[in-house]
Amino acid sequence: MTMVRQTKQRAAVIEVLRLARSHPDAAWIHTQVRQNLPSVSLGTVYRTLDALVRDGVVVTLERAGQATRYDYKRAGEDHHHAVCRGCGAIFDVDAGELPPLAAAALPAGFQVTDVRLEFIGVCPDCQTKKTV
């Protein structure tokens, strides 16, 4: 893990992500950061996000053909994600509510450093609208 130097741009990006529960993309984050730092560029936001991902502060959620979304890793809040095929909404799923995963299926000697689990389906709103 690299040590991320704390700049006002990085602090602003972290604050936006900390307050967001919508798993935003870089363009949205940029718009929010510019409210307090009008001169910050989209490139700076991307570089900051890359550094925060490398440092383990932020995780990415990637879908083919869609902008990468970002999620701030809150201490003590272990969660996975449910993604709607209809509207693309991403919902947090409390990891503590899930049964433990069997490590027996892993290759012998495999050392787990992180777990990411995504549920893909259709949210209640899209089911009602029958958009999928």
Image: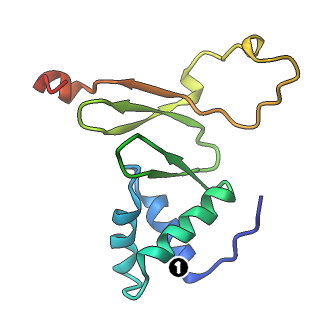
Question: As drawn, which residue projects farthest toward the front?
Answer: 65
Q: Secondary structure at mark 1?
A: helix
Give the x, y percent position of residue 42.
Answer: 41, 74
Q: Nearer the viewer, residue 14 or 65?
A: 65
Give the x, y percent position of residue 31.
Answer: 33, 72
Looking at the image, residue 67 sits to the left or right of residue 79; the answer is left
Tell me the quarter of the picture where residue 125 sits.
top left
Q: Is residue 33 above or below residue 77?
A: below
Q: Nearer the viewer, residue 51 or 102?
A: 51
Colour scheme of this structure image?
rainbow
> Residue at image x 55%, y 70%?
47
Looking at the image, residue 40 sits to the left or right of residue 4; the answer is left
Residue wearing tag 1: 9
Give the x, y percent position of residue 95.
Answer: 57, 29
Looking at the image, residue 30 sits to the left or right of residue 104; the answer is left
> Residue at image x 44%, y 66%?
16
Q: Quadrant of the N terminus?
A: bottom right
Give the x, y percent position of residue 105.
Answer: 73, 12
Looking at the image, residue 54 sits to the left or right of residue 128; the answer is right
> Residue at image x 41%, y 62%?
26
Q: Quadrant of the C terminus?
A: top left
Badge 1 density bin: few <14, some 14–19, many ≥20, Cα 10 Å: some
